[in-house]
Structure formats: C-alpha cells, structure tokens
C-alpha cells in the first residue's frame, strides 16, 4: 500500500466533507446546500428509485422522496477514498433512518446501503459528478416513500 502524504490526507478530508454535506443537507432539508455537493451536470443512479441527469433532477428526487417523512438521520461510515489527481472515487456505507408522521407517527423506515461516488476537483472544490446508491436492505414502513419496504436489494 502506498504511503499517504499530508496533502492526500487533506484532500481526503475535503472529499469526506462533501459526503457529509450531502447527508446533512438531506436531514436539514437544505436543498441549496446540494449546490456544494454536485456539479450541475451530475448524474445519479439510486437503485430502487431511478436514474437521474443533472443536479436539479437529483435534488428534486431526494426532495420528493423525503417529503412524506418526519425527521431523518443519514449516517455514513467506512469511508474509502481513492485519489487520482483532480479525480477521486469514494465509497461509504449508509444507514438512513426516516421517521413517520401523521398516521405513521412512531414508525420508522431504515435503509442500509452504500454510496459509490465519482468526484472531480473543480475551482469551487471537490464535487460529485456521479453518485450511485446500492440499497442492501429496507426495513419498516412510513407510507408514501420512494423506497418501499419490499424493495429488493439489487
């Protein structure tokens, strides 16, 4: 394994901040913050939901998916980053907990999966150019969410 330099560690920390910014933006419903996550021409494949082109389409999708939810908590872990100059790939595990509201008050929907990202370092910083969500398991029901409890893992 190659020795990590101080600069590599700094770049990895910057990339990890982008990944965390995404999770925090969803939980805080701060859709404008996703401008600091995705390039305008980004693409995404969310298994069980669909494939999207452009940041606006990605934002619209996550907004719609979270609209029927109460509070959410997107937890990221086991972050693995590979640097290659001004490009990088990142993988991290996801556990996303969605609280129900209304008739579903007190119930939760939990999604386990992995994000796989391709990033580029642009003048404004690191941004995701392609994101893929591989859903491993979905458990629970809060009604009306994009990921139904019976969504099969790919």
Image (cartoon, grey):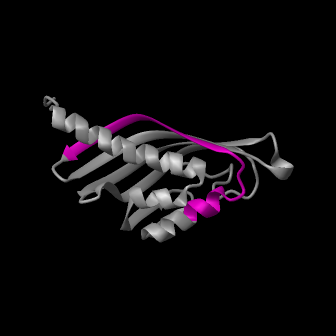
At 70% from the left edge and 52% from the top edge, which residue is drawn? 69
**Where residue 66 appears, x then y in whole percent?**
64, 56
Query: Is residue 62 found inside the magenta-colored segment of the image?
Result: yes
Q: Position of residue 6 (x, y in %)?
A: 17, 32
Task: Name above or below for residue 61 compared with residue 100.
Answer: below
Instruction: Verify whether residue 45 appears in magenta.
Output: no
Q: Which residues fall within the magenta stretch?
A: 61-83
Compare residues 65 and 6 and report the one nearer the observer: 6
In x, y percent, where is residue 48? 56, 57
Point 59% across, 54% down: residue:
29
Instruction: Give the image location of residue 102, x and y in percent.
Output: 84, 51
78 to the left or right of 14: right
Q: Quadrant of the N terminus?
A: top left
Asked if residue 67 lies left or right of residue 9, the reply is right
Vertical relation: 110 (above or below) 117:
above
The residue at 73%/58% (across/down) is: 144
Above or below 130: residue 101: above
């Amino acid at each position: 394994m190659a020795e990590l330099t101080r600069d590599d560690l700094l770049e990895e920390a910057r990339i990890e901040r982008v990944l965390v910014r995404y999770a925090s933006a969803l939980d805080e419903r701060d859709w404008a913050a996703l401008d600091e996550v995705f390039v305008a021409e980004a693409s995404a494949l969310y298994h069980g939901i669909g494939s999207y082109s452009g940041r606006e389409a990605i934002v619209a999708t996550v907004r719609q998916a979270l609209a029927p939810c109460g509070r959410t908590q997107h937890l990221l872990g086991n972050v693995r980053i590979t640097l290659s100059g001004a490009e990088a790939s990142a993988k991290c595990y996801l556990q996303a907990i969605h609280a129900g509201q209304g008739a579903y008050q007190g119930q939760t929907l939990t999604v386990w999966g992995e994000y796989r990202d391709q990033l580029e370092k642009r003048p404004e910083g690191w941004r995701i150019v392609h994101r893929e969500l591989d859903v491993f398991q979905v458990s629970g029901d809060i009604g009306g969410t994009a990921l139904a409890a019976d969504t099969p893992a790919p």
